[in-house]
Image (spheres, grey):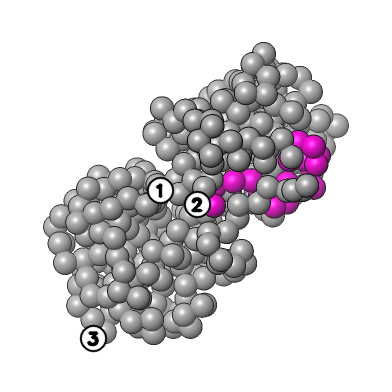
Amino acid sequence: MKKVLSVLSVATLSLSLVLAGCGSKEAQPQGQTGGNGGATGSASTIKVGMVTDVGGVNDNSFNQSAWEGLQKLQTELNLPKDNVNYLQSTSDAEYVPNLTQFVKDKWDLTWGIGFLMGDHLKKVASENPDSKLAIIDAEVDAPNVESVLFKEHEGSFLAGVVAAKMTKTKKVGFVGGVEIPVIKRFDLGFEAGVKAVDPSIQVIKVYTGAFDKPDVGKSTASSIYGQGADIIFHASGGTGDGVFNEAKDRKAKGQDVWVIGVDKDQSLTFGDDITLTSMVKRVDEAVFLVSKDLTEGKFDGGKIKWLGLAEDGVGLAATSTKNVPEDVLKLVDEYKQKIVKGEITVPDK
C-alpha cells in the first residue's frame, strides 16, 4: 500500500536543493565576457539571471524556489558563483529595467518570475530578439521566450481532499494574493477537492490583492479563523507568512488551527506544529531543467511547458506523513491516480 504521495521531483532529479543565504539587498548582475546576446553558453560558461516579482527572493514561495533552482544549476555544473544571479523588484516599474539589465549585459538566459511580469518580459523580448528569456506562470508569445506553466489546480485538489478530511468545523479557508489566472487555479482546484469529499463543507475565500504584505495576510487569516474555519490554504506568496503567524499565535492559545502551505514545503520554514501539509509546485526544478537544457543546445522558444501531476510538477510535500493520517494519504493517492488517468478533470477557470 502506498503510504505517501510525493511528487517532489521531476524525472530523476534530486530533491535536495541548497538555499544560500541572501538578504534583501538587490544583487548586481555581472557583464558576460566573450559572449554575445542570445548565445547558448557551454556548461562551464553559461550565465543565467532571474528577476523576482515584488514578493522578493526570500518570499518562502515561488521566487525563492526559482532562486534555489539556479543555485542547483550553479552547484551541479560547477559554475562560478557570479554566473547565476538575481535582481529583486520592489514594484512593477522595475520589471523592465531589471530584465533589460541582464539582457544588455549579454547573459545567456534571463528568467522573469511570476504572472505579473508577462507583459513586461514580452516588451523586453521583442526589443531584444537575439536574447533568450523564460518565464514562470505566464504565457509569452514570442519566439525567444520559453514559458513554463503549472497545473496548480491539480495539486490544489489534493490539498482540498486533505482539508476536507481533516477539518473538525466543516469550514476551511483560502487566502489568495492578486486575483489572477494562476491564483484562481489554486482556488478552484482546492474547492473542487474539498467538495469532492464533502459538498457540505464551507470554503471561505479572500483575495488580499498582494503577494508581499504579511500584515494583511495575518489580519485576513484572523478573520477567516474567526468565522470558524480551522484550516486555511494560502496562495499568496509573502503575504502568506502572515497566515502562518496568525496560526502560530492561535496555536499558542490552545486553538486547533492549521495552515496548508504553497509552492515549497513550508513546514521547513514555519514548523510542523502549524503546517498541515504543503502543495508543492516545482518551480525550482522547472528553472533548473530549462536552464540546463540551454547548456545542451536545447531551448524551446515560443513554446509552453505545462507541468502537472502526471509530470510530477505539483503535489503534496513528503512531510505530509507527520500530520496527515495514512488513510487520508491513501485517499489522496487514489484521487491523484484518477486525475492522472483523466477520470477526474479538475476545473481551472
Q: Is residue 11 above or below residue 270?
A: below
Q: In this view, does 104 lie above or below 340?
A: below
Q: Judging from the image, what secondary structure is the residue with disc 3 in? A: loop
Q: In this view, does 300 lie above or below 36?
A: above
* Residue at the image position 22 percent from the left and 48 percent from the top: 141
Label 3 and label 2: CA atoms lie apart by 37 Å
Q: Where is residue 43 in the image (x, y as percent from the top left)?
A: 38, 81
Front in this rendered view, residue 265 or 98: 265
Task: For label 3, count other residues whose C-alpha is less than 10 Å away and answer few (under 14), some (14-19) or many (20+).
Answer: few
Question: Horizontally, is 236 left or right of 103 in the view?
Answer: right
Q: Mark 2 points at which residue?
A: 311
Q: Considering the image in quadrants, where does the C terminus appear?
A: top left
Circle 1 or circle 3, nearest the eye: 1
Q: Position of residue 262 (x, y in %)?
A: 58, 44
Task: For label 1, count other residues whose C-alpha is less than 10 Å away and answer few (under 14), some (14-19) or many (20+).
Answer: some
Question: Horizontally, is 167 left or right of 91 in the view?
Answer: right
Q: Name the residue under label 1.
A: 306
Circle 3 or circle 2, nearest the eye: 2
Tell me, yes or no, whether the two marked residues, 3 and 2, touch with CB atoms within 8 Å.
Answer: no
Q: What stretch is highlighted in magenta?
A: 311-329
Q: Quadrant of residue 219?
A: top right
Label 2 and label 1: CA atoms lie apart by 8 Å
Question: Horizontally, is 314 left or right of 4 in the view?
Answer: left
Q: Position of residue 130 (x, y in %)?
A: 16, 67
Residue extending furthest toward the right: 254
> At label 3, which amino acid type do we have?
Gly
Q: Name the residue under label 3.
A: 34
